[in-house]
């Protein structure tokens, strides 16, 4: 079983940057595809980015391409999300998820393990 703990959220002005971290314990994360999702109040959990087990491939929702970068350090059992040029629509609680499937997917229901989330607020 994997335990995930997100950190790095906070309040930032539009155009600013944040780096989120997801620290895992219990199992090596190289067993899993890792992803970031976000959820704004009243909305469903939305796919943001995913990375394959060895980091060889990454996937992003169109709205964050060119601004966000997902990465992983399997030696540290940690996944990161670098977020640049933040926009108001990027605000929400960001969750880290682990999926044992062979290929990535964008559906939150497919992810087996979740962290508690870290909140990102974007202000003017």
Image (spheres, rainbow, N blue to C red):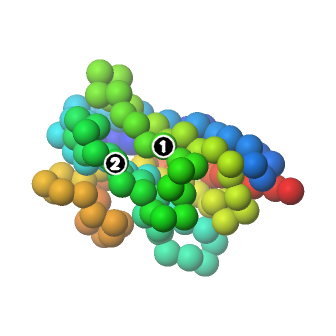
Q: Residue at x 74, y 44 (%)?
A: 16
Say above or below: 30 vs 76. below
x then y, percent, for residue 49 = 42, 54
Query: Which of the two residues, 64 or 111, is positioned nearer the viewer here?
Result: 64
Q: Residue at x 57, y 49 (%)?
A: 67
Query: Which of the two residues, 104 or 40, is positioned nearer the viewer here?
Result: 104
Label 2 or label 1, whichever comes before in sequence order: 2
x then y, percent, for residue 29 = 26, 36
* Labels 2 and 1 touching (C-beta < 8 A): yes
Query: Which of the two residues, 91 or 117, is positioned nearer the viewer here?
Result: 91
Query: Would you identify the image quadrant in which residue 89 lies?
Result: bottom right
Q: Secondary structure at mark 2?
A: strand
Say above or below: 113 vs 84. below
Circle 1 sits on which residue?
69
Q: Is residue 54 visible?
A: yes
Say above or below: 105 vs 2. below
Q: Residue at x 73, y 62 (%)?
A: 88
For this orientation, the residue located farthest to the top is: 75
Circle 2 sits on which residue?
58
């Amino acid at each position: 079983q994997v335990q995930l703990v997100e950190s790095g959220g906070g309040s930032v002005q539009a155009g600013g940057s944040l780096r989120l971290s997801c620290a895992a314990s219990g199992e090596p994360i190289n067993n899993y595809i890792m992803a970031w999702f976000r959820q704004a109040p009243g909305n469903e959990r939305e796919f943001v980015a995913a990375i394959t087990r060895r980091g060889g491939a990454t996937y992003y929702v169109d709205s964050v391409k060119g601004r966000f970068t997902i990465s992983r350090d399997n030696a540290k059992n940690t996944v990161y999300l670098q977020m640049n040029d933040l926009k108001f629509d990027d605000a929400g609680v960001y969750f880290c998820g682990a999926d044992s499937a062979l290929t990535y997917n964008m559906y939150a229901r497919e992810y087996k393990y979740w962290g508690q989330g870290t909140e990102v607020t974007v202000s003017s």
